[in-house]
Image (tube, helix red, strand yellow):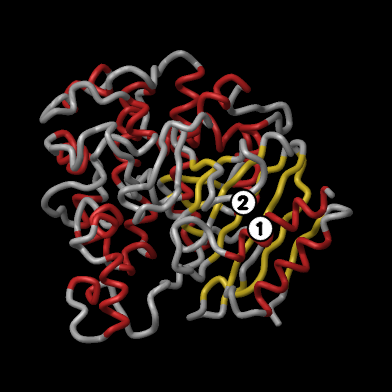
């Protein structure tokens, strides 16, 4: 049995039971979960093994890369600039980023970038890993890219390009990179262990991710699955010729190498769609500050929160194989697929299972992260059961 540490407020003991059960079932290797209610922390749990190779336990200060849960952090930065009157999400992207106005992209509004309607889910050609982690080469590729589909006609998950697209607008408006803005305006004031671009002194705290791919299958098998039926099935969903595969591994095949996501180079870079690194309590605290005050600090005003969580998309998601995944200004919203909490619930999931989520009506906010990745882009039973246990505690 894995050692479970942390605490729960009175009435939330059932959340600890669910957290423990996740380990007992073999679903977890190392993980952490935190929840805030009415601006106060009510759950803070961690346990298991952070590094399978060394046996290092998951400690109170262990960090993990959270893939697309990062998009929620980036969305908060953009929405904060909007509520300050510095960013008009209905204005053309080109009004802030003139070089973007090429190849039919002149009239694309900022809101299309945030809601995955811009038709720029991948780029033609491939960049090296060094180029992909250097910012400017990706920005230049996106400037020169023709839309993958007619902007606004459909919505399709911009799995990686979202971060560079929204991030460059933030950089042009704020005069700072997304990672710097997050640190200055959100993480610093709230006292969070949360970064897009991890300082080297914290690298030893990061839990290496464990791939969702079955043992013996590599990312190279997505390109050439051969005759193996399991490899062929995975390649059919994630292969380089599928919309999802092209979106997940943009701007080049270098990001399809699973090892790169555990590298110092990736952790140090700014990939604002996918390489946020944090702990669970920071995620929960950040989302709690979006729906109310936390120690006197509120990230989004009620008015901006309403704008940010107003549904801007409808129908099946082109890239996510027709799934009912809907978006506001950068946030995933309550849907038939993501039925967590009340109808105004919002947040973002990350590949493998991590999530930051909030419910304004219940005044609840959550953060969950782990090192054992599961195959899913919109959460899995581990986080769903933990979040539902928090609602049970309120009842």
Secondary structure of the residue carrying numbered label 1: strand
**Number of dots carrying numbers:** 2
Viewer-closest of 162 and 180: 162
Secondary structure of the residue carrying numbered label 2: strand
Q: Marks 2 and 1, how far apart in space? A: 6 Å
- Compared across the picture, whether 79 is left or right of 284 comes to left
- State whether residue 107 is above or below residue 318: above
Residue positioned 21% across, 51% down in the render: 251
- Residue 341 position in % (x across, y down): 66, 46
- Residue 42 position in % (x across, y down): 78, 49
Residue 95, by quadrant, is top left
Residue positioned 19% across, 71% down in the render: 223
Q: How crowded is mark 2: few (under 14 residues within 10 Å), some or many (20 or more)?
A: many
- Compared across the picture, whether 119 is left or right of 347 comes to left
- Residue 258 position in % (x across, y down): 33, 68
Residue 14, by quadrant, is bottom right
In terms of sequence position, does the residue under pointer 2 or pointer 1 come before the other? 1
Q: Residues within 10 Å of mark 1 (few under 14, many from 20)?
A: many
Q: Mark 1 points at which residue?
A: 33
- Compared across the picture, whether 226 is left or right of 389 comes to left
Residue positioned 50% across, 33% down in the render: 76
Residue positioned 26% across, 45% down in the render: 121
Residue 230, by quadrant, is bottom left
Q: Name the residue under label 2.
A: 367
Residue found farthest to the top: 85
- Residue 164 position in % (x across, y down): 30, 39
Q: CB atoms at circles 2 and 1 under 8 Å apart?
A: yes
The quarter of the image holding the N terminus is: bottom right
């Amino acid at each position: 049995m894995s050692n479970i540490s942390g605490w729960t407020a009175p009435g939330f003991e059932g959340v600890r039971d669910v957290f423990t059960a996740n380990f007992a079932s073999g679903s977890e290797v190392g993980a952490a979960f935190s929840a805030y209610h009415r601006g106060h922390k009510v759950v803070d749990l961690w346990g298991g093994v952070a590094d399978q190779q060394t046996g290092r336990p998951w400690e109170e200060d262990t960090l993990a890369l959270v893939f697309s849960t990062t998009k929620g952090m980036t969305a908060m930065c953009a929405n904060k600039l909007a509520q300050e009157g510095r960013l008009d999400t209905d204005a053309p992207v080109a009004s802030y980023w003139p070089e973007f106005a090429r190849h039919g992209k002149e009239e694309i509004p900022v809101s299309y970038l945030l809601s995955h309607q811009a038709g720029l889910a991948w780029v033609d050609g491939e960049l090296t890993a060094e180029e992909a982690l250097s910012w400017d080469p990706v920005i230049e590729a996106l400037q020169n890219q023709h839309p993958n589909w007619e902007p606004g006609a459909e919505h399709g998950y911009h799995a990686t390009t979202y971060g560079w697209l929204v991030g460059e607008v933030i950089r042009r408006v704020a005069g700072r990179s997304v990672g710097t803005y997050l640190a200055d305006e959100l993480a610093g004031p709230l006292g969070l262990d949360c970064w897009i671009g991890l300082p080297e002194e914290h690298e030893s705290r990061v839990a290496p991710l464990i791939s969702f791919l079955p043992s013996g299958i590599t990312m190279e098998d997505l390109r050439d699955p051969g005759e193996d039926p399991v490899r062929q099935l995975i390649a059919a969903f994630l292969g380089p010729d599928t919309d999802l595969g092209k979106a997940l591994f943009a701007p080049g095949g270098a990001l399809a190498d699973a090892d790169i996501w555990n590298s110092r180079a990736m952790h140090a870079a700014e990939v604002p769609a996918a390489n946020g690194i944090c702990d669970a309590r920071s995620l929960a605290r950040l989302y709690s500050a979006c729906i109310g005050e936390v120690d006197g600090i509120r990230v989004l005003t009620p008015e901006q929160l309403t704008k940010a969580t107003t549904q801007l998309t409808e129908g099946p998601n082109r890239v996510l194989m027709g799934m009912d995944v809907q978006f506001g200004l950068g946030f995933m919203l309550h849907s038939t697929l993501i039925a967590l909490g009340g109808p105004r619930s919002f947040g973002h999931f990350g590949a493998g299972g991590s999530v930051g989520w909030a419910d304004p009506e219940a005044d609840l906010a959550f953060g969950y992260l782990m090192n054992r990745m599961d195959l899913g882009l919109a959460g899995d039973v581990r986080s769903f059961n933990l979040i539902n246990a928090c609602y049970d505690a309120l009842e």
